[in-house]
Amino acid sequence: MEDSSAILVLERQPRELTRDFALRCLEYNISHLHLKPGQFLSEQSVCEQLGLSRTPIREAFSKLANEMLVIIYPQVGTCVAPIRQELVQEARYTRWLLECGIIKKVVQQRTEEDVRWLQWSLDCQKEIVASGDSERFLEFDNEFHKKFFEISRMTLTRSLVQGLLVHFDRVRLLYLQDMDWNRTIREHTILLDAIKTYDAETAYKALDVHLGRVLTDMDILSKRYPQYFKA
């Protein structure tokens, strides 16, 4: 019953613990749908692909189970959990709380170097639209939003909710596969313009709209990809 599909192996970071590396790789592959909802995982295959022993892989599986990203069936195996709409809603609300909560600090504390980086990121996103590379677009989108936490010096807070946000990213990647990417570009442009002009109120409103879209998108996507969603 176990599936031995290839996973994308990320570059290991300096001094990164094996269990953290395994977890980061698996979260990435789940969020980017390399490991699809309902797919069974071969512990041996994951060990071989990541070049790790069974212990860190089992620890990663246990953590993923706690994050409700995999389901461990005793005597059967481990499979990637289906997308649960209530968890996507929880992840969306968490992002909304965090990002809308810090956006005023972002506007107040951003430097010209920060603005240049955000503009570079947005320009890259525009270029990726033409290439149709949905995974790369998602990565730049995520880094664009992560920058807010760097500017406000809240990076630890962002890292603590990474597992929860994987639920959100799975729906976002489905959205990027066959819906309007330019909507994201337009919303990021409004947000960045507000940051450039120190307009915290407009930045807040732009984030509120931007992070709320996923709820409507999810209704559409759950009908389009019913095999990925929990009934």
Image (cartoon, rainbow, N blue to C red):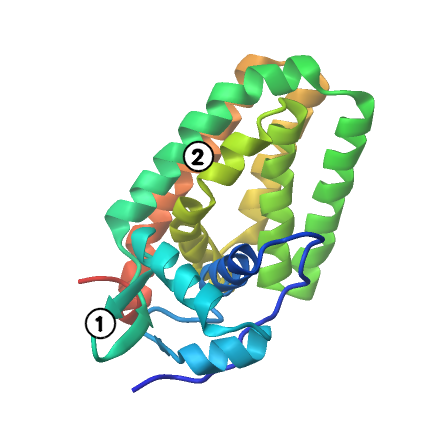
Q: Is residue 70 left or right of residue 108?
A: left
Q: Residue at x 27, y 65 (%)?
A: 71
Q: CA distance from mark 1 to mark 2?
A: 31 Å
Is any atom of residue 198 visible in this view? Answer: no
Is any atom of residue 72 visible in this view? Answer: yes
Q: Given the image, on which type of amino acid does mark 1 rest? A: Tyr
- Measuring from the top left, give residue 38's x and y in whole percent: 30, 72
Disc 1 crowd rating (10 Å Cα; few below 14, some 14-19, many 20+) is: few
Query: As displayed, is residue 32 above or below residue 118?
Result: below
Describe the element under mark 1 as helix, strand or loop. Answer: strand
| Sequence-first tag of 1 and 2 | 1
Looking at this rendering, what residue extends furthest in the left direction? 231
Q: Given the image, on which type of amino acid does mark 2 rest? A: Arg
Q: Residue at x 62, y 55 (%)?
A: 137
Query: As displayed, is residue 218 above or below residue 200?
Result: below
Describe the element under mark 2 as helix, strand or loop. Answer: helix
Q: Which quadrant of the view contains residue 203?
A: top right
Q: Is residue 45 left or right of residue 149?
A: left
- Measuring from the top left, give residue 9's x and y in whole percent: 61, 70
- Measuring from the top left, give residue 215's x and y in whole percent: 33, 44
| Front-most of residues 174 and 59 | 59
Residue where numbered disc 1 is placed: 73
| Front-most of residues 198 and 8 | 8
Q: What's the mark number on residue 95? A: 2
